[in-house]
Amino acid sequence: MKARIKFSKTGSMRFIGHLDVMRYFQKAFLRASIKMSYSQGFSPHPIMSFTSPLGIGLSSDAEYMDIMLEESNSADIMINRINAVMNDEIQVKDFSFIKDSAKPSMSALSACDYLIAAKPEGSGKLLDKKFIKKHLDEFIMQDKIEILKKTKKSEKIIDIRKNIYHISDNIVDFEKMTGQNYGKLCINQECLPILYCTLTAGSVINIKPELVLEAFCNYSGIAYNLFSYQIHRLEMYADLNGELVTMANYNVISELGGL
């Protein structure tokens, strides 16, 4: 049977790379005596995939992985079994059953919500909410928002305006835009939230929040220094008939018997 797991990654665990997170979950399932399904061949490995691995240093309330299991209990029991053997800084928040034929979450990903927070030192005017509000209103009204995007193979100027679905400096306004209720966020309390945004994500087009932050700094006349900010992922979405739905609700079935 196939399951989709939503988990948080916070605190010092945000410095753990993707491969180590994979190994961490494999060991956690073994400690919890949860039987995973393995691939066939000379080098069998657990059948699991992650939607969109975080970069080093980023934290998240909404990471997703799909995994094949040989057996399972109810969702609540599975969450408790896994969290009982996990570090407090990586915790399972949701466990859902999906059809074995369901599209992998990594290929269904269409957008992500992010929080960009400023550290007390080095952020300058971005700690001034009035300054942010004034320039953000003007920033998002532009027809084009161009920024230099660097990859391992090339550098090119791209227009990211159409890839910014929502952006706000206020969590209440942002929740109204997205229809989400984020409540208490798992982010360093010393950091001051300055921007919330929903951006295009996926294998074809993937707009990182760092690009939006850099473009906003350039527009506002502020020196951009990535190390002055903390980026936190809030949610991931799939496209369902032209509408964004959370990955936790995409291709989910309610009962084990529906598999």
Image (cartoon, rainbow, N blue to C red):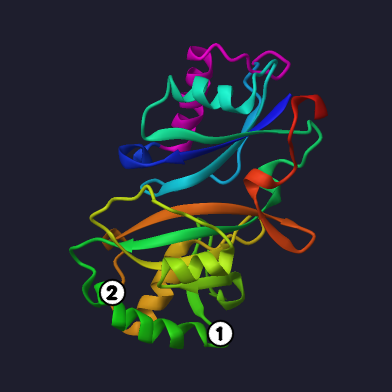
Sequence-wise first label, 1 or 2? 2
Gap between marks 1 and 2 measured at Cα: 22 Å
Q: Residues within 10 Å of mark 1 (few under 14, many from 20)?
A: few
Q: Which quadrant: the N terminus? A: top right
Image coordinates for residue 44, horizontal then vertical, percent: 65, 16
Residue farthest along the left direction in this orientation: 121
Q: Residue at x 45, y 85 (%)?
A: 137
Tag of residue 172:
none
Which quadrant is home to the C terminus? top right
Along the horizontal axis of the image, is 238 left or right of 15?
Answer: right
The residue sitting at 56% across, 84% down in the picture is 144
Image position of 199 with respect to 259: above or below = below
Identify the magenta region: 17-43
Question: In the rendering, at what x and y percent does residue 138 appear?
Answer: 45, 88
- Give the camera-side residue of 80 and 213: 80
Question: Which type of secondary structure does the marked residue at label 2 adopt?
Answer: helix
Q: Is residue 138 above or below residue 16?
A: below
Which of label 1 and label 2 is nearer to you? Answer: 2
Q: Which residue is mark 1?
A: 144
Decide: is 85 above or below 225. Answer: above
Few, some or many residues within 10 Å of mark 2 (<14, 14–19, 20+): many
Q: Is residue 19 magenta?
A: yes
Identify the residue under disc 2: 126
Decide which of 25, 42 is in the foreground and name it. 25
